[in-house]
Every structure is written in structure tokens, then in C-alpha cells.
Image (spheres, rainbow, N blue to C red):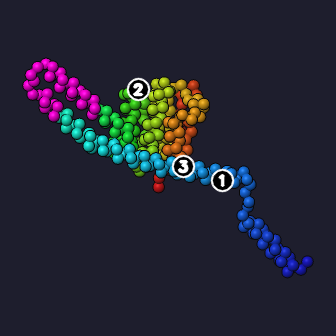
Amino acid sequence: MRPSSLLLGAAVLLALRLAVRLTPCRRTPAEEREADARARLAGRRATDYALENIREEERTHIARELHDDLGQLLATLRVDMTLLRQQPVANEATRELLTGMDERLMSAITSLRRIAGNLRPRALDEGGLYFALQSLRHDFEQHHGVACVLDARECELVLNDRYSTAIFRIVQESLTNIARHANARKVRIALRRGSGLLHVTIEDDGRGIARSDMEKPQSFGLLGMRERVWAIRGDITITGNARGTRIAIHLPLPE
């Protein structure tokens, strides 16, 4: 065969291979369904994230309104009540009435602080994520009598408000679930940076979560945690056994 014929044949073969590579492959029905499911899931997560952002902004707004308006009003009334109690009173019944009013007023201030703190932790705005997590850990120990350790470095938790709020809510929901269901004596919360990720681990020594519990439709706490993690493109693994429950979360760090 002449060299020109060989070159022509090689050129035709090369052209055919390029044409095959450039021709888009038709997907099977199963692949089409999988692609549609992924697209729907991505759309749902984007919608859930947008709604959660709106809810968080509303919580922040309401918390600040409560603190700045109603909180200031109650604080002023408490000062007035203190001054009134220092004045001479006609009888013991009046003194007891003023004392009861002061106690109820203090109870209202405490309740207001608790409600506002649940809506938007002021510790996040005042001291950042590390300070907020330390406050959360301390409150958990005080209210539930369960030892709780925070293993983290403050310098590694300097994050934007979106990430800080999401991580705080995830840890908060985890501690709520532990208090309600785990019957634990010790809890450990660890946060570490590495390989462009923030690794969050929450462990307890309680009864351990069962797989059936994780799959219950009414497990709104677990569902909310998963949605928050997925909204910032992270992944979450929850495992349980007789020695307790472990939640492992890996979140890509913001640029």
C-alpha cells in the first residue's frame, strides 16, 4: 500500500475517533431519573437555605426589638420598683405586695432574656462563635447537670455570620437532643480546621441513638441539623451504639 493511502486511512480513523468522542452520549432512563433527582434535591436545598436565612433574619430582628424596647422598659420599671420599695410604707400588706411585684417583674425580665436568647444568641454578636459556644456549654451544664467539654481554639472559629450561626444552631440542637433523649453523663464538642474543612464532632456517653430513631419522620431536630449542614455544602454522619452517640460533621470553610 502506498504511503499516501496509509496516511489517508490514518486520517479517516482519527477523524472517526474524534467524532465519537465529541458526540454526546445518550443517557439511559435510569441516568435521566438520577440526574432529575439530583437537580430537584439541589433546588430544594437552595430553597431551604434561602428560607432559613429569612427565618434567621426575622429571629434576629425580633430578638433585638425585644431586648431594645421591651427589655429597656422592664429594666426601667425595675429601677422604679426598687426606689418605691425604699420609701416608707403604711403597713406590712403593702410591703408584701411591693415585694411580690418586684419578684414577678424580675421573673418577666429573666423570661424575656431567655426568649430573646433563643431567637438570637447575643453571645454571637458580642463575642463571636467561640464565646457563644462557651456560653452554650456553660448553660447546658447548669441546666441539665451534665458535664460538657468544648475542645476548640478561638483563633480557628473566626468565621462569617452565616457559618457561625449555622454551627451554633447545629451544636445547640445537638445538646437539646442529648438533654431530651440521651440520659448522658458527659458530652464532648470538638471543632478543628484541616484540609480546607471545619471538622465538628459531638459525642456523648448516653444510651445511643438507634437507626429507627434517625429515620422517624417526626425527628425534626435531626432533620434541621442535616438541612443546615447540607445548606453550606457539608456532610454529616450520625452513629450510635451502647456507649453513646457520635455526630461527625465536615464543612467546607468559607473563602
Residue 73 magenta-highlighted: no
**Image-based side of 79 in relation to 218, left or right:** left
Q: Earlier in the sequence, mark 3 or mark 2?
A: 3
Q: Earlier in the sequence, mark 1 or mark 2?
A: 1
Q: Look at label 2 and name its amino acid.
A: His
Residue in view at x 17 percent, y 26 percent: 98
Q: Main secondary structure of the magenta part?
A: helix
Instruction: Name the secondary structure under disc 1.
Output: helix
Residue in view at x 78 percent, y 68 percent: 17
Rendered image quadrant of residue 141: top left
Q: Residues within 10 Å of mark 3 (few under 14, many from 20)?
A: some
Q: Look at label 3 and name its amino acid.
A: Arg
Dot label at residue 35: 1
Rendered image quadrant of residue 81: top left
Highlighted range, magenta: 80-109
Residue pointed to by mark 2: 144
Tell me if residue 15 can be seen.
yes
